[in-house]
């Protein structure tokens, strides 16, 4: 349904206002399987959120006095930020190390990172007891500067702006303003350098949040090196997300991509797989050294120890070997499988540190309610909606030139 | 010029500490100003489990009065609206009564975790909570070593509930409500150094009654609530696996590294960028060649 689009060559709109209105309209067939699942889920989540704000957290959530952080913090915030790590790794490779061949991946990854951070901030607000006081650490005289969370919160906010600046040239191109594009482009390097610095600090900072929970997190997961481990794992978490997401985008947005794109994409993901494998090796090695150093390997034969080995062997060591194998044989399937397993491993690790191995000895255990899960999933769904909306309209996967005659979208939005 | 042994050791110590920053961080001795904190001693051998302190606490803080009583079969827990709780514990010397409330650590984990300073260590000793500053993020609860701050999960405008050591009463020169109302004389209030001294005096004068351990002297780097007991504290259900250094020390290394990263990273990144730039590349502003 592309009749309503008002564009001139190079995407220059006849009138910006008219153009924006036309762009807001959904395109394509709305009755896709994804929409039929996501729309009702989000509607249910909206009701749950209303209940949560009327009756308090316990009306919808199972968090307790002993496990104060549940799924919303453990998954949406702690895990989600690791998944969004691809943006700083890729901008580092492309803008700092000059690896031009990965450039086609930068915009889409930065966009994903920006949306991820924005939506995880929303998840955080849902979880706050007094969300109206969220401005306190930002303005006013209430700076808790000794708090790791204060640091993480500030880095979070600043990084959202850095990513917005990194992505803004695409918006300028979409709106057809060449001058704005050129000016915004000048800010890119500054934003990239600032963004990488902020990412280093808040990826590790999310781990540092748990430093004071010594004794409450199972010794196999607690380490004074949690910050370092979180940082290193964010590298392969982010890149695995880039690989996994790329494999989906190649199919869903095939209409936007030219014939060589599959081949180029395979070359890129092979390169990224190498980085993943190396980072995972370093991570695995550090984790073993740390466990030996802290004498925690004696716990391996306990139930929590088995759970630990499932995480470390099943979802770190094996995907690492799969990445190596995929690179050697050049098989995209192996690489995709490795990336999915790595992502599961990251979910396990972050959930273990923040929720599962946190007060592992506590009975009864925290198990999220269906309502918490629905909200968690809905946040991701809405994020995908917006991601899809942008990809269909802005020059993210393709250049502006190739968009002069937009073809109708095959997937609904 | 003469230099005595104490002075010499002190100099050595200073030199050593300046050589290794880590040793200085690991120092568990209370700082001089901590001596001025108020503290409360609970002598478990004197406590009769009458709950007068619980009722006094409820009255002083406008909380509902407790409806249950100490029973060695049931472990009573602190709640967002119950700041102090007496538990009966069956031990090798018979039934004794423990009192649980905020320990008011000298360097509290919860206060250092708070990103809005809602949780704050006052110079008088209490760790207080200010409603208007709190975001309800519950990071204090993730960090707390004694599991004290409780959160009203069932309220749309939730509060954090915990003992404030009757901060308002302290400011008016009064002692905390529980101390004032204890008929058994099990609670003693005063400056921390004096209270600590009193605790040790009782142990030394009656070593058969007490175990030689003042709970709270070193736990979590020292607290403003001190306990002395006829049986080892593990038997009473007190936490015995706590650090002896203050919990905020655990994050200090990370916090100290932040400014360095902020200075070094951008310089390093820009340097790397210059070093890896190809000769024909002139895109300082990140302008690409599309």
Image: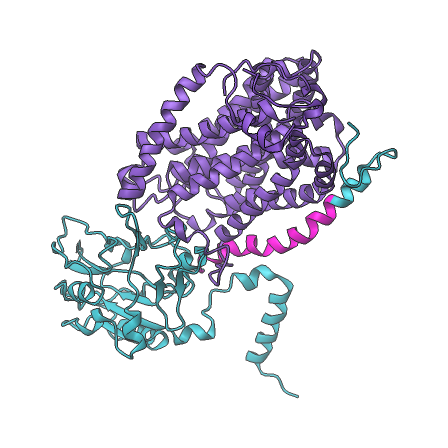
Image check: A58 left or right of A171?
A: left
Percent coordinates x, y for residue B135 in the rendering: 40, 52
* Stretch of the chain drawn in magenta: B246-269
Percent coordinates x, y for residue A98 in the rendering: 76, 33
Instruction: Please give the name of the residue rendered at 26% of the width and 45% of the height, measured from the top-left corner.
Output: B154
Q: Is residue A2 above or below residue A237?
A: above
Instruction: Please give the name of the residue rendered at 31% of the width and 40% of the height, measured from the top-left corner.
Output: A52
Q: Tell whether position B267 is magenta.
A: yes
Display colour for chain B: cyan
Nearer to us in this view, A32 or B63: A32
Q: Tell whether position B123 is magenta.
A: no
Nearer to us in this view, A167 or A103: A167
Residue A357 is at least partly visible in this image: no
Which chain is represented by purple in the image?
A
Instruction: Please give the name of the residue rendered at 52% of the width and 61% of the height, measured from the top-left corner.
Output: B26
Q: How many marks?
A: 0
Residue closest to the far top: A259
Give the main secondary structure of the magenta stretch: helix
Nearer to us in this view, A117 or A237: A117
Image check: B106 left or right of A262?
A: left
Residue A292 is at least partly visible in this image: yes
Residue closest to the far right: B279
Nearer to us in this view, B201 or B136: B136
Percent coordinates x, y for residue A394 in the rendering: 62, 27
Image check: A5 left or right of A26?
A: right
- Looking at the figure, which quarter contains the C terminus of chain B? top right
Q: Is residue A329 above or below residue A105?
A: above
Hey, which quadrant is residue B54 in on the image? bottom left
Percent coordinates x, y for residue A59 in the rendering: 26, 39
Q: Is residue B130 above or below residue A261?
A: below
């Amino acid at each position: 349904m592309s009749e309503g689009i008002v564009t001139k060559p190079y995407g220059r709109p006849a009138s910006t206002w008219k153009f924006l209105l036309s762009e807001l309209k959904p395109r394509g067939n709305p009755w896709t399987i994804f929409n039929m699942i996501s729309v009702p889920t989000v509607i249910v989540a909206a009701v749950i959120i209303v209940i949560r704000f009327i009756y308090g957290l316990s009306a919808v959530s199972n968090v307790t006095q002993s496990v104060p952080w549940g799924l919303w913090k453990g998954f949406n915030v702690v895990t989600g930020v690791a998944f969004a790590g691809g943006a700083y790794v890729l901008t580092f490779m492309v803008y700092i190390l000059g690896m031009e061949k990965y450039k086609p991946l930068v915009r889409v990854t930065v966009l994903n990172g920006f949306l991820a951070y924005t939506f995880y901030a929303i998840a955080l607000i849902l979880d706050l007891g007094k969300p109206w006081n969220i401005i306190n650490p930002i303005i006013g005289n209430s700076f808790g500067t000794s708090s790791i969370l204060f640091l993480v919160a500030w880095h979070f906010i600043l990084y959202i702006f850095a990513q917005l600046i990194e992505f803004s040239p695409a918006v300028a191109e979409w709106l057809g303003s060449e001058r704005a594009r050129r000016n915004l482009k000048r800010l890119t390097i500054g934003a990239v350098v600032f963004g990488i610095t902020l990412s280093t600090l808040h990826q590790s900072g999310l781990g540092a949040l748990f430093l004071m929970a010594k004794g409450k997190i199972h010794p196999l997961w607690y380490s004074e090196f949690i910050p370092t481990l979180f940082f290193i794992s964010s590298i392969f978490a982010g890149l695995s997300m880039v690989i996994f997401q790329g494999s989906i985008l190649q199919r869903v947005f095939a209409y936007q991509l030219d014939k060589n794109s599959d081949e180029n994409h395979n070359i890129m993901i092979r390169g990224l797989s190498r980085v993943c494998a190396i980072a995972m090796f370093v991570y695995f090695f550090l984790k073993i050294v740390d466990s030996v150093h802290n004498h925690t390997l004696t716990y391996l034969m306990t139930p929590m120890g088995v759970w630990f080995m499932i995480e470390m062997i099943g979802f770190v060591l094996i995907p690492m070997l799969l990445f190596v194998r995929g690179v050697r044989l050049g098989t995209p399937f192996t690489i995709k499988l490795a990336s999915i397993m790595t992502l599961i491993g990251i979910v396990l690790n972050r959930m273990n540190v923040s929720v599962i191995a946190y007060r592992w000895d506590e009975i009864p255990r925290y198990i999220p309610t269906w309502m918490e899960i629905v909200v968690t999933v809905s946040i991701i769904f809405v994020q995908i909606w917006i991601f899809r909306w942008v990809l269909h309209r802005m020059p993210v996967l393709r250049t502006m030139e190739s968009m002069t005659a937009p073809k109708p979208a095959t997937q609904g939005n | 010029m003469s230099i005595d042994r104490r002075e010499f050791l002190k100099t050595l110590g200073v030199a050593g500490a300046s050589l290794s920053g880590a040793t200085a961080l690991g120092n568990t001795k209370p700082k001089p100003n901590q001596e001025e904190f108020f503290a409360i001693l609970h002598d478990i051998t004197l406590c009769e489990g009458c709950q007068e302190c619980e009722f006094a606490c409820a009255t002083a803080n406008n909380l509902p009065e407790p409806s249950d009583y100490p029973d060695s079969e049931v472990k009573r827990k602190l709640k967002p609206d119950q700041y102090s709780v007496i538990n009966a514990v069956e031990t090798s010397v018979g039934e004794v009564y423990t009192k649980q409330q905020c320990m008011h650590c000298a360097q509290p984990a919860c206060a250092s975790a708070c990103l809005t300073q809602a949780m704050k260590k006052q110079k008088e000793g209490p760790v207080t909570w200010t409603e208007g500053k709190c975001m309800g993020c519950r990071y204090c609860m993730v960090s707390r070593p004694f599991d004290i701050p409780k959160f009203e999960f069932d309220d749309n405008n939730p509060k954090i509930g915990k003992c404030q050591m009757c901060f308002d009463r302290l400011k008016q020169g009064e002692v905390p409500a529980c101390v004032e109302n204890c008929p058994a004389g099990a609670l003693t209030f005063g400056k921390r150094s004096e209270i600590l001294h009193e605790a040790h005096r009782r142990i030394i004068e009656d070593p058969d009654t007490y175990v030689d351990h003042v709970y709270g002297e070193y736990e979590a780097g020292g607290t403003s609530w001190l306990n002395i007991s006829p049986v080892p504290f593990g038997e009473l259900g007190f936490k015995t696996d706590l650090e002896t250094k203050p919990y905020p020390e655990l994050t200090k290394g990370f916090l100290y590294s932040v400014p360095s990263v902020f200075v070094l990273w951008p310089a390093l990144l820009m340097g790397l960028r210059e070093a890896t730039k190809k000769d024909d590349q002139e895109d300082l502003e990140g302008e690409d060649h599309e």
